[in-house]
């Protein structure tokens, strides 16, 4: 999964409606000043279906994904955020109190493991968070009725 191709910049693969991408987008926005180091590539739902450059960085075809200037291919919003903090952070987002930090980690884990679940639009996967923001029209590979998260819970005929 790791690569060795070095580039002048890092690339952040983003989709406007993705809440997980928004975590990375928010970090970059609030931190600021990293335009020379990190380029955001804004993808569409069609790009998620097609794969394109995204699949080279994340074979799961999910955003956010992140390609470092050292050629390391990262995905999972928490991992990307940790990398950003380690590489570019200056401590401003790190809470001073150890118990406050633990509480934040707990909320993040609860969201990632129990709320967002597999968060997959493929047939027969649950998609608990998608009902909050996904467009109600079909993508290339999924039928219209499959786009409704409620119907994804119905047993097959
Ligand atoms: N656990 C992952 C979740 C990533 C994820 O599910 N991304 C969604 C958008 S919020 C996605 O790309 N879904 C496309 C699909 O599953 O087809 C993270 O924290 O980054």
Image: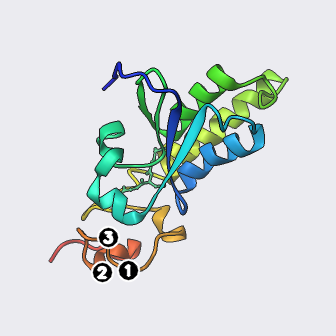
Q: Disc 1 and disc 2: Cα gap in Å?
A: 6 Å
The structure residue drawn at horizontal position 77% and vertical position 31%, both measured from the top left corner, is 93
Q: Is mark 3 on a helix, strand or loop?
A: helix
Which residue is farthest left?
A: 157
Residue identifier under label 1 = 137
Image mark for residue 152: 3
132 vs 120, left or right, is right
Mark 2 Cα-neighbour bin, 10 Å: few <14, some 14–19, many ≥20: few
Foreground label between 1 and 3: 1
Residue 28 appears in view: yes
Which residue is farthest right?
A: 96
Q: In this view, does 55 lie above or below 100?
A: below
Residue identifier under label 2 = 144
Do the CB atoms of the residues marked 1 and 2 lie less than 8 Å apart? Answer: yes
Quadrant of the rendering where the C terminus is positioned:
bottom left
Q: In this view, does 21 lie above or below 131?
A: above
The structure residue drawn at horizontal position 31% and vertical position 71%, both measured from the top left corner, is 139
Q: Disc 3 and disc 2: Cα gap in Å?
A: 11 Å
Residue 128 at what x, y percent from top left?
Answer: 46, 62
Residue 60 appears in view: no
Residue 78 at what x, y percent from top left?
Answer: 55, 35
Determine the image quadrant of residue 150.
bottom left
Q: Which of 7 and 60 is in front in this view?
A: 7
């Amino acid at each position: 999964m790791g690569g060795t191709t070095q580039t002048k910049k890092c690339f952040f693969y983003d989709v406007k409606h993705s809440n997980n991408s928004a975590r990375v987008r928010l970090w970059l926005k609030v931190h600021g000043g990293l335009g020379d180091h990190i380029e955001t590539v804004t993808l569409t739902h069609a790009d998620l279906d097609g794969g394109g450059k995204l699949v080279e960085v994340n074979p799961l075809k999910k955003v956010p994904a992140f390609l470092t200037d050292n050629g390391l291919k990262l995905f999972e919003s928490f991992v990307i955020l940790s990398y950003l903090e380690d590489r570019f952070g200056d401590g401003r987002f790190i809470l001073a109190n150890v118990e406050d930090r633990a509480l934040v980690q707990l909320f993040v884990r609860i969201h990632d493991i129990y709320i967002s679940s597999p968060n997959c639009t493929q047939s027969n996967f649950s998609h608990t968070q998608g009902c909050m923001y996904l467009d109600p029209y079909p993508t290339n590979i999924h039928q219209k009725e499959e786009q409704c998260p409620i119907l994804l819970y119905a047993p097959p005929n």
